Amino acid sequence: MKSLAVLLGLGISAVPALLMSILASIRLWILGQTTPQSSGRTVLLTGGKMTKCLQLARLFHAMGDRVIVAETETYKWCGTRFSKAVDQFLIIPTIQGDGRAYCRALVEIAEREKVDLFVPVASPKAALYDAIAKPMFPAHTEVFHFDEAVVKQLDDKHQFIQLSKEFGLSAPESYLIDSKEDLLKMKFTAGKKYILKKVEYDPVYRLDLRTIPHEGWQERVRALPISPSDTWVMQEFIEGQEICTHTTTQNGAVNLYVCSDSSPFQVNYAMLDLPNVSTWVETFTKKLNATGQISFDFIIRTDGEVIPIECNPRTHSAITVFYDQPLAAQAYYTSVASDKTYLPSAKSKPTYWLYHELYRILTSNGLQQAQFLWRRIWTGKEAVFSWADPWPFWFNNHINIPYQILQKMKAGVAWTRIDFNIGKLIVQGGD
């Protein structure tokens, strides 16, 4: 019933969305389109289903680069495929087993298409395999991604906290948990609460932020899949302001940076000027001294202390705030990189995803909240839609998502939520 209701809603809204895309196309035809002068470079991106891939494709295209996007069969109708910024859209194997077929497909594309730069827009699962594939790429392809050992260390929630401490930075209490019995016997520090997280990324468990101890917490722990082969982390619960950042770093230097409010399900981004956060990030990246994309989640205590919660060695959706700054693509070119740090422009509007906001309006508690959400729509920037590149919005929301819903219905697989930002349905055990 949930799937049918969503399909009905998306079917109804598809008509005005289609008319808007047609209107934008007519507008482009009347005004004429300018084609950027070719740079002679070819850029390969993955993760086509995600808005952050579309954003990077548009940035590189504006710099005159030829953009190739690779994605798996499940997301073959993603909006990015229909962007004018994308020269080629290619289907690659899903990651299975040792991931060899996935890695080899990327390398073959780089060889065949003479790719100059590979920038993985990775899912949590793909980030490691992109790193494994890195040394396999031909010499003419620059891979903008951390090495395998660095990805493993940063992606491990416990190891990341330990590394932060080694770098002399603030960090919360953190305990590696591989036994339910040991956790049930643990003596908690009086007055403190803790959060349980899987070490391996999980799209469903990550949203369960109940603190322990709480009434009935033992039953909850017994139901969790905690084992030596499925380890968890117990972190000190920190109260304060939730913040996320995204950074492009080359050999420890910060070349691109954005800081925004955050939450467990964040689909709104606007630049925040928080010197204590940027200082923490600059210190960490300098000491790490590597090249890649790195995103952090923080809690800022009421006294201003910055506490890291976790690190993701991959692109963050907050990069959508660079929609009006094509030169930001230069943060990925080692051949032209300088000491410059690209920040969101002062004129950039906060980004949002329209259908997430409309759902919030429909389920809002009262007129005041609904008015606030409407103001967000009228004063912000829809992250996918562009008058200069209109079709990704229609295909992402009205072809890609319905296609996935129908596939899940056919397979009898339950889904918990739609994430229009990353262009997919959230399912238990997903990527």
Image: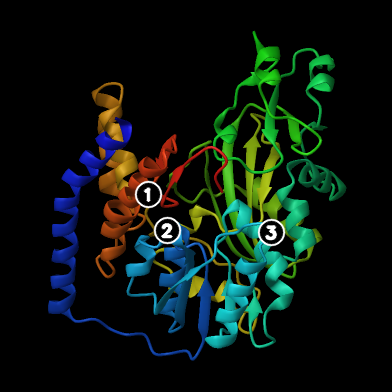
Question: Mark 2 Cα within 10 Å, few/some/many (few <14, many 20+)?
Answer: many
Quadrant position of residue 142: bottom right
**Distance from Cα at disc 2 to Cα at disc 3:** 20 Å
Where is residue 328 shown, x and y percent of the image? 50, 71
Q: Would you name the residue on which mark 2 appears?
A: 75
Dot placed on the residue nearer the N-terminal end, 2 or 3: 2
Nearer-N-terminus badge (1/2): 2
- Kindly check if marks 1 and 2 are in contact, taking CB atoms under 8 A apart as contact: yes
Q: Secondary structure at mark 2?
A: helix
For residue 292, say whether it is visible.
no
Residue 44 vertical position relative to residue 73 in the rendered view, above or below: below
Residue 32 x, y percent position in the rendering: 19, 81
Which residue type carries mark 1?
Gln
Left or right of 346 on screen, residue 3: left
Label 3 SS: helix
Amino acid carrying mark 2 in the image: Tyr
What secondary structure is found at the residue carrying circle 1? helix
In the picture of the structure, the residue carrying the numbered disc 1 is 404
Number of numbered discs on residues: 3
> Can you say whether 65 is above or below 89 in the image?
below
Q: Which residue is mark 3?
A: 128
Q: Label 3 is placed on what type of residue?
A: Leu
Q: CA distance from mark 1 to mark 2?
A: 8 Å
Question: Mark 1 to mark 3: distance in Å?
Answer: 25 Å
Taking the image as shown, residue 23 lies to the left or right of residue 346, namely left
Going from the N terminus, do you reach mark 1 or mark 3 first? 3
Residue 167 circle label: none
- Residue 401, how many percent across, how many down? 34, 50
Residue 347 visible in the displayed image? yes
Report the residue at 26% width, 36% height from top. 4
